[in-house]
Image (spheres, rainbow, N blue to C red):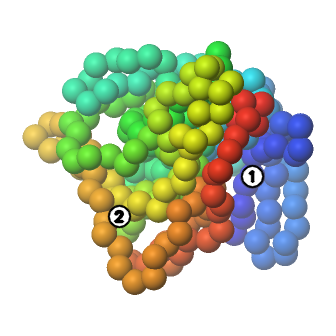
């Protein structure tokens, strides 16, 4: 019966407050949980797991975050920092660079304590990168190795990821996407702008747990008929029924400036 909102950006101000909307009365209440709240940010993910909300990543005007925080929603409400940095695992279990991103998606895997993270971007020392990796985050702190099959979407951020019935399959649609790496030289010459565009591609992501003792992640692109869905990112998506998803809003990424990233 309620909606909990955390953080966001108001013009040049980044926030880290939490509010609850009572969906019956329409009344907002500011939450005052104990503990240290995450640093102010936007473009993070906030996912309900049981009676807690997990806030992962996000960014401000200077950087992308790779931390994880848990907000316990039952009294006494409290913030807990679950992880300061995440060590991602590529398919097969090899560890890579520390994970950090904004504009990624996060969805709960079925009724488990696992979050399925996909995509996102970061701006680090004048180099902008977008990602198309999947990370399985268990209990907010440990990345789970998996076996990968199929071709993923191109690197993207601010896409939508909608769970299907059962919570082990997801529909990933649209997003802002471009070359995996844009250098400072490309920014100065304007070439970086020409490398950005929006996507209208739609993929399914299936996660199968404990197949012969392994976790499997499989991608497949959907060929959608009917009226063409225009390319976009930053849209909203929600499942209306077993076989229907509503996509709403969004925009076209034509240009961007380094100070706007985050």
- Count of picture labels: 2
Can you give x and y, in whole percent of width and height, for residue 170 in the image?
39, 59
- In the picture as drawn, the residue positioned furthest to the left comes out as 212
Give the secondary structure at mark 1: strand
Image position of 46 (left or right of 170): right
Disc 1 designates what residue?
Answer: 5
The residue depicted at 45 percent of the width and 82 percent of the height is 227
Image position of 173 (left or right of 247): left
Image position of 245 (left or right of 89): right
Residue 105 vertical position relative to residue 89 in the rendered view, above or below: below
Which image quadrant for residue 44?
Answer: top right
Nearest the viewer among 91 and 107 is: 91
The residue depicted at 73 percent of the width and 54 percent of the height is 4
Can you give x and y, in whole percent of width and height, for residue 203 in the image?
35, 58
The numbered dot on residue 166 is: 2
Can you give x and y, in whole percent of width and height, for residue 64 in the image?
64, 27
Pointer 2 or 1: first along the chain: 1
For the N terminus, the image quarter is: bottom right
Graded by Cα atoms within 10 Å as few (under 14), some (14 to 19) or many (20 or more), the crowding at tag 2 reads: few
Nearest the viewer among 33 and 145 is: 145
Residue 124 vertical position relative to residue 176 in the rendered view, above or below: above
Nearest the viewer among 247 and 183 is: 183
Which image quadrant for residue 33?
Answer: top right
For the C terminus, the image quarter is: top right
Give the secondary structure at mark 2: loop
Can you give x and y, in whole percent of width and height, for residue 240 in the image?
50, 78
Q: Can residue 240 be spotted in the picture?
A: yes
Graded by Cα atoms within 10 Å as few (under 14), some (14 to 19) or many (20 or more), the crowding at tag 1 reads: some
Contact (CB < 8 A) between labels 2 and 1? no
């Amino acid at each position: 019966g309620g909606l909990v909102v955390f953080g966001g950006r108001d013009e040049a101000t980044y926030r880290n407050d939490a509010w609850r909307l009572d969906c019956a009365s329409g009344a907002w209440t500011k939450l005052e949980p104990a503990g240290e709240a995450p640093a102010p940010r936007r473009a993070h993910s906030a996912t309900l797991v049981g009676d807690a909300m997990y806030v992962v990543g996000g960014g401000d005007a200077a950087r992308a975050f790779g931390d994880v925080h848990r907000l316990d929603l039952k009294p006494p409400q409290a913030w807990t920092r679950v992880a300061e940095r995440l060590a991602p695992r590529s398919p097969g279990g090899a560890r890579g660079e520390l994970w950090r991103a904004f504009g990624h998606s996060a969805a709960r895997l079925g009724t488990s304590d696992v979050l399925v993270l996909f995509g996102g971007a970061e701006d680090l020392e004048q180099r902008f990168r977008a990602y198309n990796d999947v990370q399985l985050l268990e209990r907010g702190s440990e990345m789970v190795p998996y076996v990968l099959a199929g071709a993923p979407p191109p690197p993207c951020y601010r896409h939508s990821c909608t769970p299907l019935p059962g919570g082990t399959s997801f529909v990933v649609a649209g997003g802002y996407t471009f070359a995996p790496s844009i250098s400072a030289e490309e920014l100065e010459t304007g070439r970086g702008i020409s490398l950005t565009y929006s996507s209208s591609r739609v993929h399914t992501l299936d996660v199968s747990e404990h197949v012969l003792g392994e976790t499997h992640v499989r991608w497949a692109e959907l060929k959608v008929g009917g009226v063409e869905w225009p390319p976009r990112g930053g849209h909203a998506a929600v499942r209306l029924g077993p076989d229907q998803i509503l996509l709403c809003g969004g925009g076209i990424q034509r240009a961007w400036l380094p100070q706007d990233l985050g």
